Image (spheres, grey):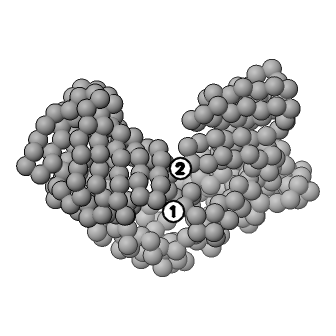
């Protein structure tokens, strides 16, 4: 239904026919019906309402949930973006002028992209264009954009609980409990969202979980790092998990996929000690090269060129102990890298 409008140059959004007075979504007020039935001009985008206003929207019948899904020609969107937000358009163009391949994806220029203003498609284009069209959609849709909506669509036990991971409960009802790396227990609680990850723990009332962004704002304002630095980090060769850290040491569990390799590198401020706990490691340190198997270790002195490779058929697991005055990831000088990183 939307394709003919998009092909003709319209910017189409899908408005979800509301099933309840949801306060967690923005709404779209439809306008004049288009020449071909089933689509309407967009009269207005409406912010997330309070409960009474949301009930009015549902009863009115001319309001839809704003799904945030769009269909349009790329050329039309870019033309509208260039007209209404040339600052965003220019920043993105600059970022794409200096791209770098990285394994099976492409890195845009970081410095240029950081300069791009932060704005949504709704604010930047859809609320300003004269060619916005809404197509109603009634398909049992959920954006699964919050933990509470994930509880809504999940299979629950006979007390209405949804559990993932190592969870034990007593006299608890209608909760969503997610345990990533440890035991989580609940006693005598109802209608909660409990999320335990390696980075942090969230406990929220199920009907207020949309306000988790308020906590993120506090984290940013306090200069904390939880919103952008995580224990588990993925790299082209595999991943690492920061297990422990002190004033002059850091412990990581490094997982290297079969056939992959860390860059040939050197550090100015730290030494490293590697202990193999699974698989086979090929270690290069200066002019020395050797193979290590499980329960064998190797010491990398400060300032020494070194590399670590998995020549085997199973994942290589290594415990890395860093020690020194400065332990951050940017203390690295790469001399060779199979993934094309600088």
Rendered location of residue 240, percent (x, y): 39, 44
* Residue at x-position 15% and y-position 48%: 285
Is 297 or 105 nearer to us in this picture?
A: 297
Is 36 or 237 nearer to us in this picture?
A: 237
* Residue at x-position 29% and y-position 42%: 274
**Residue at the extreme top:** 158
Q: Secondary structure at mark 2?
A: helix
Task: Name the residue that disc number 2 marks.
Answer: 3
Q: Secondary structure at mark 1?
A: loop
Q: Would you identify the image quadrant in which residue 282 lies? A: top left
Indicate whether 163 appears above or below 134: above
Indicate whether 142 appears above or below 27: above
Is 24 or 68 nearer to us in this picture?
A: 24
Is 62 or 221 nearer to us in this picture?
A: 221
Distance from Cα at disc 1 to Cα at disc 2: 10 Å
Image position of 152 (left or right of 291): right
In the picture, the disc for residue 9 is: 1
Rendered location of residue 109, percent (x, y): 34, 67
* Residue at x-position 35% and y-position 54%: 323
């Amino acid at each position: 239904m939307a394709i003919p409008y998009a092909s003709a140059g319209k910017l189409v959004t899908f408005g979800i026919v509301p099933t309840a007075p949801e306060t967690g979504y923005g709404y779209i007020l439809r306008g004049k019906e288009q020449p071909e039935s089933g689509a309407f001009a967009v009269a207005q985008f409406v912010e997330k309402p309070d409960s009474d206003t949301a009930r009015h929207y549902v009863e009115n019948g001319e309001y839809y949930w704003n799904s945030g899904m769009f269909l349009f020609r790329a050329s039309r969107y870019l033309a509208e973006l260039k007209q209404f937000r040339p600052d965003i358009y220019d920043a993105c163009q600059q970022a794409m002028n200096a791209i770098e391949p990285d394994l099976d994806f492409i890195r845009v220029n970081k410095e240029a992209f950081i300069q791009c203003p932060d704005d949504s498609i709704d604010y930047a284009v859809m609320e300003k264009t004269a060619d916005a069209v809404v197509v109603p959609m009634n398909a049992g849709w959920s954006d699964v954009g919050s933990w509470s909506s994930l509880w809504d669509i999940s299979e629950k036990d006979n007390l209405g609980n949804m559990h993932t991971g190592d969870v034990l409960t007593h006299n608890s009802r209608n909760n969503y409990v997610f345990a990533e790396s440890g035991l989580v227990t609940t006693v005598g609680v109802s209608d909660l969202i409990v999320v335990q990850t390696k980075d942090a723990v969230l406990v929220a009332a199920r009907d207020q979980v949309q306000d988790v962004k308020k906590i993120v704002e506090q984290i940013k304002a306090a200069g904390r790092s939880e919103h952008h630095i995580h224990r588990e980090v993925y790299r082209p060769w595999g991943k690492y998990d920061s297990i422990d850290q002190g004033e002059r040491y850091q412990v990581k569990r490094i997982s290297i996929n079969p056939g992959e390799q860390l860059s040939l590198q050197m550090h100015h401020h730290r030494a490293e000690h590697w202990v193999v706990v699974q698989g086979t490691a090929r270690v290069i340190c200066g002019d020395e090269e050797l193979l290590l198997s499980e329960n064998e270790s190797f010491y990398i002195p400060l300032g020494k060129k070194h590399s670590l490779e998995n020549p085997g058929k199973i994942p290589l697991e290594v415990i890395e102990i860093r020690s020194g005055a400065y332990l951050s990831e940017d203390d690295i000088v790469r001399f060779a890298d199979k993934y094309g990183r600088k």
